[in-house]
Amino acid sequence: MIDNRFLAGDRELTEEDLRPYLQPLGRSIDLSPIDERIEEIRADSEIGAQSSLIDAELAPTLHRALDLTRNEAADAGLWHYLCVVRFPEFVHYRWDHVYDPESPGNMEEKFLKAGTDAYSNALHRIWWGAELTYEKAESGDIKDRDYSRTKRVLGFQELANDILDHDFARYIPVTHACGDLLCHDTLNEIKEEGTYNNPPSNSNIVSRTTTLLREELTVRRVEMMEEDDIVETIEDLRDDVMRREAGWS
Amino acid sequence: MSGQWGFTTSRPTDARYGDDVAKYAMSHGEPGLKTFVREVLQNSNDARLANDQPARVTFRLKSLQGDEAIEYLKALDIETWSEHANLATDTESGKHIAEAIKRIKDDEKIRILTIEDENTEGLLGEENADESNFTALVRDVLFSSKSGDTAGGSYGLGKAVLWLYSGLSLVMFNSTLSDSDPKDQSPRLIGRTRLPTHKSEDGDTVYQGHGWYGGLNDEEGARPESIWGEEAESIADDLQLSRPDGPGTSIQVVDFRVPTAEERLNDEELADQITEMAIEWFWPAIYRGNLEVAVEVEGETKQASIDEYPQYEPFTNCLDNRSNSVDQLAEPGDVTQAAISIDVPEKSDGSGGADGQLDLVVRRTDTGEYQHRNEVAFVRGAGMVVEYYDRDRVVVGNQDFHAVLLGGRARPWGTEGCPQDTDTIVEEFLTAAEPPQHDEWVRTETLANTYSRGFRTAVEGIKSDVTEALRGLVAPDVNRGATGPQRLGNRFKIGNESRGGHSDRESPSSQRVTGSTNISFDEVYTHWSFNGEVEPLSDRNEIRAVTVSLVRMAEERATSDRLPVQNISSDTAGVSISLPEQKGVQVGRLEPVPGTSKISFEGVSKEDHRQVETRLKVSVEVAERRGD
C-alpha cells in the first residue's frame, strides 16, 4: 500500500483503508496538542520546511503528549499509524527532500521502520530523541520536564543522527554527556576561547568524536563506567579531535 | 641370562640422522602429555581383540632408586648402550641423551613408565615380516600395519611418541601373543633405541643410530632379535616388565619425561593427569565398554572412571538419552539430534563413494556444567574424541549445550541400529582425513591421494554444517510473527549470510575462498600481529592477489576507520609484496606467481596506543587457473 504515489504525497491512506490492519492501543491519547504545535511550527517564519529545527521544536510537545512506556514505543505499528494515517502531511513537510522515485527507500523508512531503529521513522525518531535526552522534573510532573538538551540535540542534525543511530544511545548517561559536550553551544564556546588552532567544523567534531567513542566502547563496558568517567572520556576524545590528533582517516 | 644391545651399521655415504624423523614429526605441535596418552591408548584400542571384552590398559609409573635402579640398569645392558649414546653427542638430541645418562648415574634414580595392555593382539608377526604388529610397532619407521578403515591410527607415526617421551630414547617391549607363534613361546621381549647416527671411537664404523636389545645370533652384523619364552620371562622380571598371562603388550618407556614440561612432575601428579586425559579423549570407548584404563603408582591402582570426572557426563548423557530425544531443547538436560549429510566421493580407483550421514546429538547444559560447554566432541568408530570443536559463538539466548558428532561406525551409537555399509565408507574417509596427530578432520595428503574430486568439500563442509545445524537446534524459540520480525531480522542478521539475504550482494570472494586468519595485540611492541592463510575453494581457481587491511570495530559494526599495516610477509614462494595506500591508509598486498593456490602471510600493524577492537579484513582476488 505504501507505494510511490503515497510517498510522493499524491495519494492518502485513511483509517478506513487501513481498518483491517489496525489494532487498538488499549487507551486513548489526545493528539490535538501535537496538531496545534505542528501548526505553530509551520507558521513560524524562522523555521523553514525540512529543517532539523522542526524536530527540536516538536519534540517536547510530542513526548509529553505521547506519554508511552519504552515498551509501547518499541511497537513499530504505533508509529506506522501515526505517520501514515494521522500525520502524513507533517512527514512530507519535514522529509520531502529525501524522496527519490528511483530509490524510494529513504522516504519509505520515514513512514515505516521504527521498532528498535530509533533513527529512521519521522516521529519515532523525535520521540526517542526526547526520551533519551530530557531531564525529569523534581516534581515528577510531565509539564515541568526540561527539554532544553533535547532541543540542542535534535536541532543539530549530525549530533541527533550520531546519537540515535548507535548502540550507546541506549544508555542515558552517554546520551546526556554527548548532548552536553558536543552541542553547538559548547563547541562554539570552546572555539571562542581559541585553545585550538584551526579546529574542524562542528559537524566533523561530532561525527569523529562519536566514531572514536564507539571504537572505545569495543573494549570498555559503558554500563560499568562512572558518569564522571564517561564525561571525561568524551571530553578527551573531543579534545583530540579538535587538535586534529585523532587519527583522521 | 640377559639380552644385549646391537646397533645397525651403515656405510659412510648413507644418510645420517640427527634425530628420529617420526619422533620429530610427532613433537611438532603439542608434545605435552596429551599427545602421549592419546597415541598410546589409541594403539591399544586399535589392537583390541575381536571379542566382547574391553582392551585393558594400565599405566604403571615407578621411580627406581639406589640398588634397585642399579640392578635394573644392569639388566638393561646399559653399559653397551651408553658407549653408543656417548658417541652421538655431536647432535642436539645426542647431547640431551648424554645429559640424561649423567643425571641418572648421579642420582642413582630412574623413572620408568610401563604401559601394559590386555585383551589385545600382542606383537604378532615374524621378526622380518613385511607387515605385522611387531614390525609396525617395534621395527619400522612411518609404516602402519593397521587396517586403515577403522583403526584410530593410520600413519605409523603415533608409536614415535614412545621414544619422544623417553629421556634416553629407549623403549622396551614384552608381549604375550594372541596367536601362538609356530616356532616360539610367548612372551616375546625386545628393546629398541633411536640414537642419532654416530661413529665408533676409532672412526671406522658408522652406526645408523637404530639399536636393538635382544638375543644376538651368529650372523655377523645382523641385528639382535626378540627373546622368547622362559628366557624372556626371566629378563622381563629383572626389567620389572613381567606381565599377566593373557594376550597383550607391555611397553616400557625408560626415563619417562614430558618433553615440554617446565619441571619434572612427580609421579602422583603425572598419574592424575594421565587418568584425566584418558577420560577426556577416550570417554566414548570407555563408555562403550571397549576400553578400560587404570593408572598405578607405588602399587596403588586407580581406575579411570567417567563417574570421577563428571565434566564428561554431559557427553555420555547425549548417548544415554538419544533414544528419548525431543524436538526442542526446552529444559536443561533435554537431548535433541540432527543429521549432517556428508557426500563421500569415490576413491581414485572408482570404488567406495556414498551419500553418508553424521549424527549430531545435542544436550542442553544443566546448571553447574561449565567444562567443555558449547563444545562438540567429534567421534568416529575408534571411540576416541578427535577434537572438541568450540562453538561458544553459536549460542544465543542462554541455550548452552554439550554435543557429540558421531561419524562412521559410531553413527548409530545410543540407538538400537547397527552401522551400515555407508557408515563404513564414511569411517574410512574420516580416518583418511585425520593428520598424524589424529586431532581434526581436514584435507590431508592421504585424502588427496586416495579420493577423487569432491573430498575437499566433503571434509571442509563438516564444521560449517555442524554450526548451521547447531544454530537451528539451540537458537531460542521465538514466536515468529508476520512482517515485523522479518524486517527486524534483516537488520540484526546473525551468521555469515549477507544482510538482507540477497545472494547477489555477497562478495564473490566470500564464496570462492576458504582459509583462516588470526589477529592479536602484542603488548610488548604495542602493535597488532596478524597472520592468515587463504586458498580458493575450487581447484579450478587460483589466487591473483590478497589485500590485507585492519578495520576498527565499533560497538555494533565495523567503522570506516583503518589502522595502517606496518609490514607484511609471506612464506609462500614467489609472492610479491607491497604496501599500497587505500583511502589514505597503508594496507598489505600480496601478488603470487601464476598457479599459486594457497597463500599464507603474517604481519604487524603500526603502533596502536588506543588498543580498541581491530579486525583483519582479507580481500582475495581469485580467477580461473591459467594454463600450466
Image: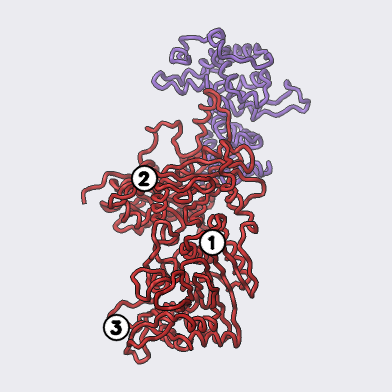
Q: Which residue is mark 1?
A: B54
* Chain whose colour in the figure is purple: A
Asked if residue A159 is positioned above or below residue B592 in the image, the reply reads above
The residue positioned 60% from the left and 43% from the top of the image is B364
Whether discs 1 and 3 lie on one chain: the answer is: yes
Q: Are marks 2 and 3 in contact (CB under 8 Å)?
A: no
Residue A73, can we see it?
A: yes
The residue positioned 65% from the left and 41% from the top of the image is A223
Whether discs 2 and 3 lie on one chain: the answer is: yes
Q: Position of residue B81 (x, y in %)?
A: 45, 85
Which SS class for mark 2?
strand
Chain B representation colour: red
Q: Are marks 1 and 3 in contact (CB under 8 Å)?
A: no
- Report the amino acid beneath label 1: Pro
Q: Is residue B103 left or right of residue B143?
A: right
Q: Earlier in the sequence, mark 1 or mark 2?
A: 1
Q: Which residue is mark 3?
A: B12
Instruction: Please give the chain letter of the residue carrying mark 1.
Output: B
Instruction: Please give the chain letter of the residue carrying mark 2.
Output: B
Q: Is residue B59 left or right of residue B192?
A: right
Residue extending furthest toward the left: B627
- Report the amino acid beneath label 2: Ala
Asked if residue B459 is positioned above or below residue B15 in the image, the reply reads above
Residue extending furthest toward the top: A16
